[in-house]
Image (tube, helix red, strand yellow):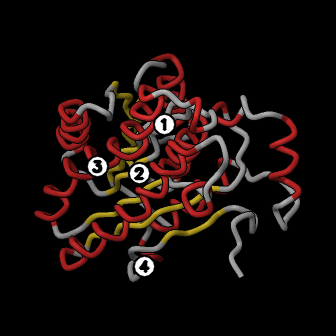
Amino acid sequence: MSLQDKVAVVTGSSRGIGRAIALKLASLGAKVVVNYRANAEAAHEVVEAIGAQGGQAIAVQADVRDADDAKRLIKTAQTTYSGLDILVNNAGTTRDTLLLRMSEKDWDLVINTNLKGAFNCTKAAIRPMMRQRYGRIVNITSVAGLAGNPGQANYSAAKAGLVGFTKAVAKEVGSRHITVNAVAPGYIPTDLTASLPQALVEKAIEMTPLGRPGTSEEIANAVAFLVSDEATYITGVVLRVDGGLAMMG
């Protein structure tokens, strides 16, 4: 599997799953734009790690909630590497609490980051991809978007929205040889899940048929497959990488 000389933008890739995706795509030959909102030090560490393994990468600060920032992010990838082939919409956040206690601010923050951010970046990336009649887009959703999760009405809604967004855009751009897919992780230990109560973590692992948490690298492997030439006839798919956690029937 090779991504030699492909240009990839990975949003929210200074840590966690995004970091693993950036490293994986770079290891396959892609030139990677490491996007971050606030943690410049972590983003530059990812760039250095990619450079150490012989790859090419730059770090670009952009808040994907802002349409102008998203456009600038995509434009920077194009001007730096003379093109854009791959977009991974990974940027996300959580503000967990029961709905009755959830503030409008926390609802808006999660929706705007996890769902509107993907809209902003995809809209900016679609035009150059359509012109070159090639593109690979992967949206990182969650099993919470498939089955819901108590205390995560905002997060579940945003991730469910990404599922519908993925399928709609896949139908719109398929004729231009652009594929749009989603990956739905199960329980993956990251900074984002570090605040989960231990009892909830144990329950998630207990409900996972494979009996263990997943790793960021396992999510990255799935993304790498979907953006590769091995997946040229796959679009509009939501690939669960969850150890069976959200298995239905």
Residue 101: image x %, image y %? 59, 29
Residue type at tag 2? Val
Q: What is the spatial separation of the Cα atoms under label 3 and label 4, in whole angstroms?
A: 21 Å
Q: Regarding mark 2 in the picture, which secondary structure is present there?
A: strand
Residue 130: image x %, image y %? 15, 64
Residue 196: image x %, image y %? 74, 34
Q: What is the spatial separation of the Cα atoms under label 1 and label 2, in whole angstroms?
A: 9 Å
Residue neighbourhood size for the residue with mark 2, other residues' Cα within 10 Å, grouped as few (<14), some (14–19), many (≥20)? many
Of the image marks 1 and 4, the number of the one nearer the N terminus: 1
Of the image marks 1 and 2, the number of the one nearer the N terminus: 1
Q: Are marks 1 and 2 in contact (CB under 8 Å)?
A: yes
Residue neighbourhood size for the residue with mark 4, other residues' Cα within 10 Å, grouped as few (<14), some (14–19), many (≥20)? few
Foreground of the two, 53 or 65: 65
Q: Nearer the viewer, mark 2 or mark 3?
A: 3
Q: Is residue 36 visible?
A: yes
Q: Regarding mark 3 in the picture, which secondary structure is present there?
A: helix
Residue neighbourhood size for the residue with mark 1, other residues' Cα within 10 Å, grouped as few (<14), some (14–19), many (≥20)? many
Q: Which residue is mark 1?
A: 13
Residue type at tag 4? Ile
- Badge number at residue 88: 2
Q: What is the spatial separation of the Cα atoms under label 1 and label 4, in whole angstroms?
A: 24 Å
Of the image marks 2 and 3, the number of the one nearer the N terminus: 2
Relative height, residue 132 to residue 152 (above, below): below
Q: Which residue is mark 4?
A: 234
Residue type at tag 3? Phe
The residue drawn where x is 70% and y is 61% is 242
Q: Which residue is mark 3?
A: 119
